[in-house]
Amino acid sequence: MNNEHRKVGRALTVRSLVIGSVGSIFITTSSLYIALKMSSLPWPIIFVALASMFSLKSLGQTNFGEINVTHTAMSAGAMVAGGLAFTIPGILILHPGESLNFRAVMVCSVGGTVLGLIFTALIRKYFIEEKELDYPMGEAAAETLYAGDEGGRKSRLLFGTMGFSMVFTWLRDRMALFPATVMSKTMGAYGSSCGFYFSPMLIGIGYILGPALLAVWFFGAVLGDGVILFLGQKLGFYDLATATAIKSSLGVGLMVGTGLGILLKGILPKTKEIALAAARREESVLSGRWMIILAVVAAAAFTYFCNLGPAASVLVILGTWFATAMSAECVGQTGINPMEIFGILILLFVRMLTSVGETEAFYIAAIVAVAAGLTGDVMNDFRAGHIMKTSPKDQWIGEAVGGLIGSVTAVFALYMILRAYGSEAIGGELFPAAQAATVASMVGGISHLPAFIIGIVAAAILYMIGFPVMTLGLGVYLPSYMSLTAALGGLLRWLVGRFRAESEEKGTIIASGFLGGEGITGVAISFLIAFGMM
């Protein structure tokens, strides 16, 4: 990353917050819709970084700091919407015809956002500056802004590959000129998702992360689909239902165990240092006292409006701290944020210790997923800001403004969708809401407890000895066609490093273009769908 030249100047301005706030409304609305419709959510950072740069330049002279604050505010609500869409609709899937308590949903959304704001303030320094995780989407955003500002050969290469990725994604998703995936019928007969996903974004992520992490990721896919699903059934050890339960429970267990390892190895030993940094207000405008006050207010709101009870509310806040750390680690290593998995983890933990009901369990998952989603998204923004030497305090203020606006917007967007289409549309062909369906299935308990426990123990041990086990868990849990595509990117990085080492930087620019093009087109399509233009 060439970061020797930087435009300096005032980062936090009125126009950065105004543009970021307006953008947050549109990005959040479209993200809520696309998460329900397509059971996925593209990272918005490349799109909002470019939108912020072009908007500010059209108003006069600007600088990278102001652009970073603007795109941080603009994107903050996207994963808040994802946290809601991936959890709350599970209530309607589990209990068809039931109405949502939108007052409680609003408390989950705003409360989860507040917790996300507190915890990103506490953990930013550790993950961004000390651990120096990659955050591939954040690095791609910084590369995009530099190349766009420089012009010349880098700019042509970046925007050329970005244009290719945009056209490719549009032809794939909007025009449906070719299938998004090619699947193995032989493996599919055993419940496997073995195949290839035609995704420039995943290839770009694989290239940026590199061959080592992708080898572990791919091994997880082989373990999940090849060994557990295919060989396990082929050899007659169990049937399809049992195989599927083992695979999903082991994948979730591996990610939960990774989170436990993060807590024991990375967070708890740094608690004093993180707290001292927060007390010096290095990370945000909030003092430690205000963080405690907001956490107490959030606990009271969860107790009163969401019927969680005092003990469960306190456990949720402690669990959210745990989940946001997992989110920061996962996004930093892989570029993927399985926020609903973190929600599942904490709801299971709280239900073991308290007597909260089924509906309340979904509220817990939503609070955690919103906080983890916000954290994962904004840590990308913080990574871009760190590369460009933007004040983290200014970015945090942008995050707070955009995130809180997004938390309210997301609830209104969900209300309008249910009012327009009816609650019966959730979980059906119109709005599959696959992640929410997963949460609904887990509210009743772990489908295969031994595999879940094995995953937790194995991952915690492996993480403690330095093995990148989060990518292993993702490989087991995610559809294997995603893993194969990402592995192709990792293989390309290995080949370039082996035979054309001088071209590695050029490859990173191309990968950033792939990431940005599919991300921008995904957001654009979501806008068109959300506002009835598709």
Image: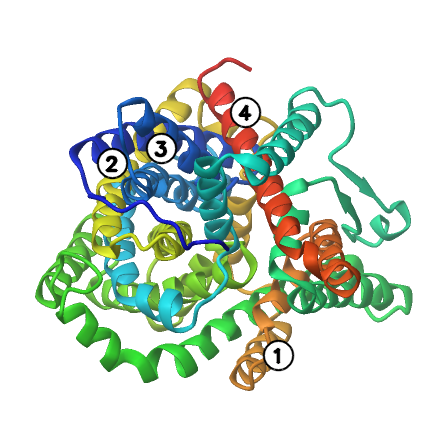
Q: Which amino acid type corresponds to the residue marked 2 in the rendered image? A: Ile
Please state which of the two labelled residues, at mark 1 or mark 4, is closer to the viewer.
Answer: 4
Question: Marks 4/2: CA distance?
Answer: 22 Å
Whether label 2 touches label 1, CB < 8 Å: no
The residue under label 4 is 525
The residue under label 3 is 52
Q: Residue at x 51, y 13 (%)?
A: 533
Residue farthest to the top? 533
Please state which of the two labelled residues, at mark 4 or mark 3, is closer to the viewer.
Answer: 3
- In percent of width and height, residue 471 lies at 61, 65
The residue under label 2 is 405
Q: Secondary structure at mark 2?
A: helix
Whether label 1 touches label 4, CB < 8 Å: no
Mark 3 or mark 2: which comes first in sequence? 3
- In percent of width and height, residue 249 lies at 61, 66
Q: Is residue 48 above or below residue 119?
A: above
Whether label 3 touches label 1, CB < 8 Å: no
Q: Residue at x 83, y 54 (%)?
A: 190
Q: Residues within 10 Å of mark 3 (few under 14, many from 20)?
A: many
Q: Along the line of sight, which residue is nearer the eye, 67 or 364?
A: 67
Question: Marks 3/2: CA distance?
Answer: 17 Å
Q: Which amino acid type corresponds to the residue marked 4 in the rendered image? A: Ile
Which dot marks residue 454?
Answer: 1
Question: Marks 3/1: CA distance?
Answer: 46 Å
- In percent of width and height, residue 508 lies at 61, 51
Q: Along the line of sight, which residue is nearer the eye, 149 or 492?
A: 149
Q: Residue at x 41, y 35 (%)?
A: 48
Q: Residues within 10 Å of mark 1 (few under 14, many from 20)?
A: some
Question: Marks 4/3: CA distance?
Answer: 19 Å
